[in-house]
Amino acid sequence: MRAVAFILYASLVTLLPVLVVAWNHGALTPFWFLAGDAYLYLGIGQSSSGLAMSFDGLRPTNGFHPLWQVFVRAATALSATPLQAMAATAYGAIAFTLGGVLLLGFAIRRFTGSWLLAMLSVPGVYYLTIGQALRNLPVWGFFSGMEAGLAFFIAALLAYLTSGLNARRRNPPWLTIGIILALLVLTRLDELFIPACMAVTVALWSNRPYAERITAGALIALPTAIGLALFVGWSLWTTGMLAPVSGAAKGSGALVANAWVTLATFFAPMIELREGLTSYTADRSGLAGGAFRVVELIIPAAFAMGFLVHILRRNAQALWAPILAGICGGIVIKTIYNIGAVNYWHQAPWYFAVAMLMMTLGAAIMLAPAVRRLRRGGRVIATLVLSTVTLLHASLWSSDLMTDRLRPAQRDFWLDRNELQDRLIAADPEIRLLEFGDGMLNFTFDFPVRHGFVFAGDAQSLEALRAGRLLRESHAEGFEVLSSYEYLRVPEGAESWTSEDIRAFLLASFLDEDVKDELRHFTFEMLTVHRPSGVPFIRLIPRG
């Protein structure tokens, strides 16, 4: 009965935002959940054919996490309309998240013997302790149509399998664990540190004979190695690239900038000190707006280090100890990698599903002795308090979704797609678009759209970006119009802007500096502007 009660409770609290939004918006519900980058996946799914993947329908790309891209491509192939594909992607992420919540809850129950602690699985310890201040990283955030929901589900499956090891009283199923880890890595490639670190911890842990430990480590690492080899081989065959183009386009010179933002976030007086000693002027709104990116990276990693120490001191002889220690180590190494190689601006909540899950699981294990000492009355009170607070957070998250002005604006833009596309084709019958955004334009229009940020780009675009020739080479292939749904918005009257007005606007925009340097080779014409959104469509005209 308690298990049934937990399932009902966890399902209700997890799905509450979905029920509220679906009741109010019906078939258009996906717009209230899909994050910007989900449209990159949807666009690739819509534009691809055969064994290759493509964003623009012309050149192959590998700018995605493969397992989730396969899911989204299948969703688009099986859907009769784009809106159905959006719904399949959003509801798929929701279903995986719910499955992860339930698996994590049952894993915590098996680790700790407490249904009270199992309730922490939603919204998660990170959100209950710190995330609520920044409105990020509850389980509801994994409804975004990104790979986080699937990663959360797979990690929860691993936690559930691990939680039963002591009860089974036999050798852990190392190969099964390795296969689950391989699926996790193919869902988020930057989780490859987890099987690598787990293979080492299992091989070095001193609670088994040496030969058995080496064999176990090999069985853990082998499926991931095979999976990555297959992906790299496919990537090389279809795109000519070994590594995903998204990582190559994002990773450059991140360490110094990330170190400064981290210091400024955790110790604000550093801003005044730097301004006083140098000519630096802080963008305080930018630092405050990006604080959640810093916290969601640093706090779970710091917790993982603390939980690793707890395992070594309190649980070293448990059969599950080297497995959870390996996960902790992988989280820490990934954090170090992200600080050094991935600018904070490119990091988002869907990067951290595993770290968030581990924070909940680790906190539950560490709290278990205290909960066991509670008398029945104390457990009842704690259950009522926790369930009430969680229900409050679910309701507040629902309210945030319902009052978010960006969601209906995105819906309205997409619903205007036919009229807007007709207007663009009337102005340029051979139109091809270069999108500096998160994929919304690619998924909206039927004509070719290439990714200007090159996160979902191709080998030639990456080479052109690095050489400072992206605009010129794209223009030579017919991509003569530049736009962005998310990052370029013009005011009323921009329809009459001159070329120099447009140039000044683009130079002050979010475009990469290398792209801004190329603007000198062009003059500009405002092809059209979508109203009321203010999304501009700018024609590039080569000088001379």
Image (spheres, rainbow, N blue to C red):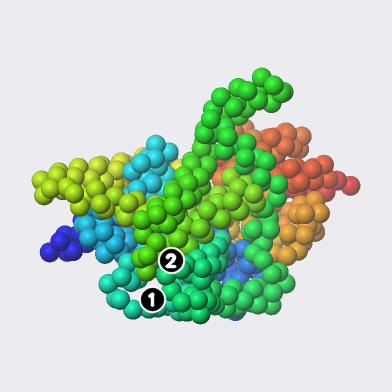
Q: In the rendered structure, are the residues bearing label 1 and label 2 in contact, judged by CB atoms less than 8 Å apart? A: yes
Quadrant in the rendering for residue 451: bottom right
Frontmost residue, 265 versus 374: 374
Earlier in the chain: of badge 1 and badge 2, it is: 1
Frontmost residue, 462 versus 258: 258
Amino acid type at mark 1:
Pro
Left/right placement of residue 305 relative to residue 104 reads right
How busy is the neighbourhood of tag 2: few (under 14 within 10 Å), some, or many (20 plus)?
A: many
Left/right placement of residue 382 relative to residue 60 reads left
Residue at 35% of width from left, 48% of height from top? 125
Q: Residue 357: image x %, image y %?
A: 39, 56
Q: Which residue is mark 2?
A: 323
Q: CA distance from mark 1 to mark 2?
A: 10 Å
Q: Residue furthest top?
A: 276
Q: Which residue is mark 1?
A: 172
Identify the secondary structure beneath mark 2: helix
Identify the secondary structure beneath mark 1: loop
How busy is the neighbourhood of tag 1: few (under 14 within 10 Å), some, or many (20 plus)?
A: some
Q: Residue 512: image x %, image y %?
A: 70, 45
Residue at 75% of width from left, 57% of height from top? 474
